[in-house]
Image: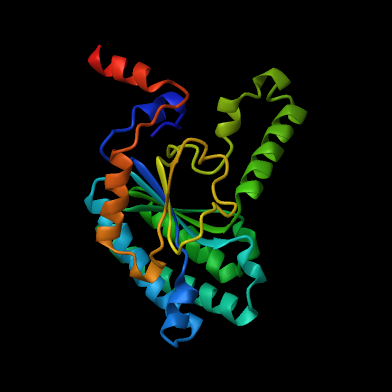
Amino acid sequence: MVAATDNTAEESTANQPRHIAIIMDGNGRWAKQRGLPRTAGHQAGFKVARNIVEAVGKRQIEALTLFAFSSENWKRPPTEVRLLLDLFMSALESEVDKLMANNVHMRFIGERSAFPEKLQKMMNRSEQRTAGNTGLKLAIAVNYGGRWDIVNAAKQIATAVKSGDMELDDITIESFHQHVSLADCGEPDMLIRTGGDKRVSNYLLWQLAYSELFFSDVLWPDFDEAALDESIVQFSGRQRRFGKTGEQLEGAKRA
């Protein structure tokens, strides 16, 4: 797929998004409501993530990006961070065969150098194994932050200018876009955040410029296919104008 611009995004089907991004929030609160440790919430959340990946693939949606571990999550209690990393490694060991069977192409976005070497190697192997798959494009955001993404892109461009591979006049919105995460995957048409909070929490700040935002009060471990379909139905009812007027879009449809 080519990188999305405002024009390519405008061509997205009115009935279904091509690319969905999700902030999977509410695991801890879900566990607390049931008198369970937070670990139980994360384990339940992982099972839901697996189900949603399958559901998105069945609906012929091209891409799904999940916010699994933010650059701010290191601030959580060390025991919880260790659990999340252990769960991550366990998931890679158990799920890659299923991704292969379902033709899912998986990759990771974020600063992976902060992770243990064993986990980094597992991530690399998982990407290599699924690289040839042609179905759902699944991106997992780990140790990811939207500001990091933009700064990282700026560093790449500054390096190119310094080396003479780019001129200052070559720096445009389009060329900058080529250096951020998911540049080849198309910008998300919609963002879903579960758990009731209504903010993007430093997630895909560049990529969400024209995304439709959906905030659900459902805690992530309770999010299911019906909730996913409800969000897609809401998306299909929105008019995506990208700076144009509604009258212009209606006129284009009649033309």
Which one is nearer the viewer's eye here, 24 or 64?
A: 24
Say how the picture is coloured.
rainbow
Q: Residue 156 in the image: state x and y as whole percent.
A: 67, 37
Which one is nearer the viewer's eye here, 42 or 245?
A: 245
Q: Residue 251 in the image: state x and y as whole percent.
A: 30, 14
Classify residue 173 as left or right of residue 215: right
Residue pictured at 71% horizontal, 39% vertical: 155
Classify residue 188 as left or right of residue 157: left
Q: Quadrant of the C terminus?
A: top left
Residue pictured at 52% horizontal, 37% vertical: 209
Does the image show residue 134? no
Looking at the image, the residue that sits furthest to the right is 162
Query: Does residue 173 sit above or below 100 in this rendering?
Result: above
Q: Quadrant of residue 118?
A: bottom right
Does the image show residue 112? yes
Q: Quadrant of residue 223?
A: bottom left
Residue pictured at 29% horizontal, 38% vertical: 237
Classify residue 48 as left or right of residue 78: left
Residue pictured at 77% horizontal, 30% vertical: 162
Which one is nearer the viewer's eye here, 103 or 15?
A: 15
Q: Residue 171 in the image: state x and y as whole percent.
A: 66, 24
Q: Quadrant of the N terminus?
A: top left
Which one is nearer the viewer's eye here, 79 or 127?
A: 79
